[in-house]
Image: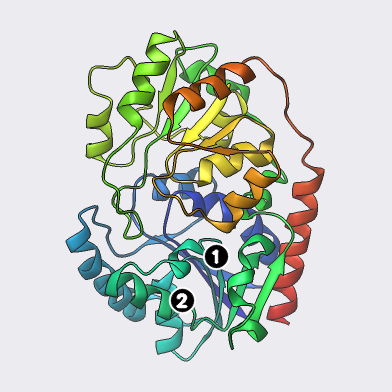
Amino acid sequence: MTTLWVDLLNPSHPLFFKPIVDELAKEFDIQITVRPRAETVLLAEQLGLEASVLGSFHDEKRMKTAATVNRVITLFTKVPSFDWSISLEDSDCVAVSRLKFKRSILFFDNDLKYRKRNGVIQFAENTVKLLATHIIVPKAAESMFADTNLRKKVHSFNGYKEDVYLADFKPNPSIKDQIPFDRYVVIRPEASLSFYVHDGSSLVPVLLSFFEGSGIPVVYLPRAKEDVDLAAGYEVFIPKVPLNGLDLCYYSDAVLTGSGTMAREAACMGKPAVSFFPGDELLGVDEQLIKDGKMIHSRDVMEIGEYVLSHQGKKNLTSYRRSQQVKKEVLGIVKDILQ
């Protein structure tokens, strides 16, 4: 039987790959590895994804390259034989697949990394990712391939990667017992340690000040110790253990993030969604959601505050029928490739 290797890098990956793994496991042998970054390992365990923890992760930018090289070596030596690899925005997995002369499927939607030149390290990562045998992207991120020789191996789908795992989402009301507020907004800070983020200033303290002054409780989701420090002196709730981000979105009044994934989850869910990503250029998927009126982008605290206040209490949750169609389309693409 054909063996598939799935590699999980970041906290959103267990959610994304859970429905894909469940479906493909009916026809293929599957082995999973996971990088110990933030809550990725725990989320994989909570979702029932049996994975081997391999490699390491460092927040400090100068250590990231060494950790990546070390992880590639570790994966090369410890991942058992496989026929195909499947990953999301994962240069580690693609590199190992190429070194082992195996085929790979890479999902990505961060076209901003490819449109902006951010130094040698980011260029090297981009170059490796584009070596994947097949690339699957949302149509909103497809345009960057229009005039390249990669076009023949690029597959696109209508929707967003977040749709894949929202398709079967059922909210768990027990999460409300773990949050000390009946109503709240979710705030996740900028991914300031990512190579593609250069503006080191954070909007988080100003946002926290606004919502505290407005009497609106905040569930705050820091990535690293530096993010925790941003909330010093403010009355916020920081979960002691990772909580399901989709449940947090579902029961919130709004979701605000300096990165992107949680805002897209909220937008696809029909919740008020704000991106305060620190840059004038946005991902194609975010631009499309903004164009469709499902999300806003701003770093003006008053504009953000007015948007959130104007949507408080509105029940604008959407049907997941569209997400179910997206999931079906994505699985169809993957199965066609693997045939």
- Please name whichever residue, 215 or 4, is drawn nearer the observer in this view of the structure: 215
Q: Is residue 1 visible?
A: no
Q: Which residue lies furthest to the left in this view?
A: 62
Report the amino acid beneath label 1.
Answer: Phe
Q: Which residue is drawn at 51% across and 18% down?
A: 184
Up the image or down, 244 lies above or below 328; here it is above
- Please name whichever residue, 62 or 290, is drawn nearer the observer in this view of the structure: 290
Up the image or down, 287 lies above or below 303; here it is below
Q: Where is residue 21 in the image (x, y as percent from the top left)?
A: 62, 61
User: On the rendered structure, is 192 left or right of 91?
Assistant: left
Q: Position of residue 156 (x, y in %)?
A: 69, 69
Give the residue at mark 2.
129
Work out which quarter of the rendered image holds the C terminus and state it. Answer: bottom right
- Please name whichever residue, 125 or 243, is drawn nearer the observer in this view of the structure: 125
Up the image or down, 88 lies above or below 184; here it is below
Q: Is mark 1 on a helix, strand or loop?
A: loop
Report the amino acid beneath label 2.
Answer: Lys
Q: Residue 108 carries which label?
A: 1
State yes or no: discs 1 and 2 in contact (Cβ < 8 Å).
Answer: yes
Q: Which residue lies furthest to the bottom in this view?
A: 101
Q: Position of residue 319 (x, y in %)?
A: 79, 36
Up the image or down, 331 lies above or below 304; here it is below
Q: Position of residue 45 (x, y in %)?
A: 47, 47
Give neighbour class at mark 2: few <14, some 14-19, many 20+ (Cα, 10 Å). Answer: many
Give the colour scheme of this rendering: rainbow
Rounded to the nearest angstrom, the CA distance separating label 1 from label 2 is 9 Å
User: On the rendered structure, is 325 left or right of 47?
Assistant: right
